[in-house]
Image (cartoon, rainbow, N blue to C red):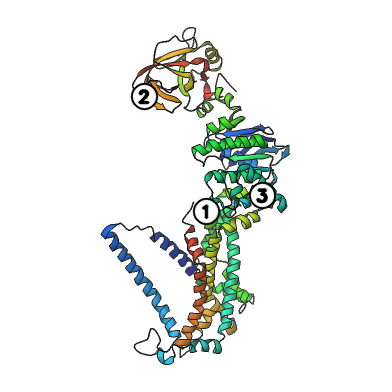
Amino acid sequence: MGQVELLQVSKRYGDSVAVESVTLGIEDHEFIVLLGPSGCGKSTLLKMIAGLEEISDGEIYIDGRLVNYVKPGDRNVAMVFQNYALYPHMTVFENIAFPLKMTGVAKAETRERVLRAANALGLETLLDRRPEQLSGGQRQRVALGRSIVREPAVFLMDEPLSNLDAQLRVQTREELLRLHARLQRTTIYVTHDQIEAMTMGQRIVVMRGGVVQQVGPPQQVYDEPVNTFVAAFLGSPRINLHAASLDRSGDDLAFRHGAISIPLPQRLGRLARAGASAAEVALGIRPEDTHVMLGASEATADQVTLPATVSLVEPVGSDLFISATTGDLAWTARAEARLPVRPGQQISLRLDLQRAHLFGAEGRNLSHPG
Amino acid sequence: MAIETEFAELRSAEAVTSDRTAKASRGLGGSLYLVATYGVLILAAFIALVPFLYVISTSFKDTVALFKYPPEWIPSEPTLINFQELVQDYPFLRWTLNSFIVASTVTVIKVIIDAMAGYAFAKMTFPGKDALFLVVLMTLMVPFAATLIPLFIIVRDLHLTNTYVGLILPALASPIGIFMMRQFIETLPTDLENAARLDGCSEFQIFRRVILPLVRPGLVVLGVFTFMTQWTSYLWPLVIGTKEEMFTLTVGVQSLRSLFTVNWGVLSAGAVLSMLPLVLVFLFLQRYFIAGSIAGALKE
């Protein structure tokens, strides 16, 4: 109950392509997150699964049944919309009961199921109110109630938390996860928020320009991004990503940007020799692998130390985000919250190259080709 | 009919709302501005009301009082004789019934048709939608005077002169209501229909259960406009009705003027009585009417 399979699904509007040849299998009970920037096609893909957008090409199966030509109401899916899409002229009870009413469920059973859903979401006391009398969080719960009352095979959620304030968003995120754990229903969740994706998804699907870039468990996608786009999209602050040429003089390879030379450790050197036919590559190191050193200490074989000047210090409570420059290379480092650093200060940056990524032609990750 | 009037009324409703955006600054300049604004408005209201007040006053005067000089604004001996004469000597009740049948039938059918067409143009996708809507809008530009004669010939050839169908049918095909309902429905978020679609609604159920209740103010505004326009419609009923019992109020009241004499008292009584339903409709539905006429401007 709740397997979804997409086979080469595409959506075109005239000449422009919104979704291109997406093939994806979603397991029963899975919580999968479609992640990407605005306009990447994630919401379009979700609407195609729901049946709200026609498919230009490809096939969609839900529980083994081809649903390309099945009406949205007959696909056994329920959707939570970004703006909740509650019916303003109906009470909370009527809103939650509406899908049951439309499918001809008997009144007594409707009442029982609505009350059960309302209890699960803490809406018992609000059943007589209209949406305009509810807070954002309450509306969100009513929208959830309307989708769970049908007991569908698949939940589709289109950025359901984006209209909530930061605190409520975290709280609702946890509630959604608890709900998923309890109901064990397949959930396809669309967001542009990487934190939501990382914390909620069992797998995430990163999309860009209608094309799936990478599919995998969140940590894996974070640790092994297949290209510069995924590397840059996941992670806050952004990964340090610098284009440079490969210096092949001598035995070891070095990454050269103007006067700055960073010798590559053997692992990356091998990859560069094998994969980067072009001289141009990009080096990516996450801020947490870029360490700020105030005193002298010995670097290991996989580490490189660069002198740098601090340009900006951003305390976020638990950490410090330190922006620094070496020549015209800008770095961001994540440092311990109480490190005594101020703008203009000369520091050393230690790059942990063991965890660095080398990107070759078209931004492909040579370390993790995917 | 009287599409021009209908459109002018819509425009004036818009003008009133845009006037409100003019903000009075504080202080002496602000006070003067307010005095001037209200002065102009009171003057305009006075100029607009005087003829009505005079007609009402005239309807309660007998023949002697009518020609007194200086004229009396409030008759010293008010009388109901004009009303009595109107009802006894002329088929005034029949005319009222005719007007009521025509105006209410047109209103009901037109509100339904226009809401459906408005929904289709606002929310559905079908080939040639934009072109078709353009054609609908273009028909707004055609003055009624230009279609009057061809329309009359068609209706005559269909043997519909002096019938209710002949009075009602042409009035149903007016584009302004379609345009208005499309504008109303377009402001509703598409996700509402999508939610209804996922909840198992057919296209008609979406229209009936989700869209219609949400555009109720729009429906009322359209209904009131249509009823008012039909109630005051003159040219088409004049052309299509030749028998006295098929006159509507406007045509009937006008027929009270004979060739050489005009009984101003009876004529005024007819005018007052024919105005009455409109005033009542407006008063009862005022709340919706005002909310509806500004609803388009207040997108969420």
Q: Which residue is mark 2?
A: A311
Considering only vertical position in the picture, is A361 above or below B222? Answer: above
Closest to the camera, between mark 1 and mark 3, is 3
Secondary structure state at the residue bearing disc 2 = strand
Residue A148 numbered tag = none
* Picture quadrant where residue A212 is located: top right
Q: Which residue is disc 1 drawn over? A: B187
In this rendering, which labeled residue sits more in front, label 1 or label 2?
A: 2
Say which element carries label 3: helix
In terms of depth relative to the viewer, which is nearer, B154 or B33? B33
Q: What residue is drawn where x is 59% and y is 33%?
A: A33
Residue sitting farthest toward the top: A251
Residue type for callout 2: Ser
Q: Does A296 sit above or below residue B161?
A: above
Chain holding disc 2: A
Dot 2, how many residues are within 10 Å of its Cα: few (below 14), some (14-19), or many (20+)? some
Label 3 sits on residue: A99
User: Distance from label 3 to label 2 (Cα)?
Assistant: 56 Å
> N-terminal of the two: label 3 or label 2?
3
Residue B171 appearing in the image? yes
Chain ID of residue with mark 1:
B
Image coordinates for residue A365, horizontal then vertical, percent: 55, 21
Gap between marks 1 and 2 measured at Cα: 48 Å
Q: Report in which chain the residue with disc 3 lies.
A: A
Pointer 3: residues within 10 angstroms few (<14), some, or many (20+)?
Answer: many
Q: Which residue is nearer to you in this view: A186 or A359?
A: A186
In the rendered structure, the answer to whether residue A288 lies left or right of residue B42 reads: right
Q: Is residue B233 visible?
A: no
User: What amino acid type should be assigned to the residue bearing mark 1?
Assistant: Thr
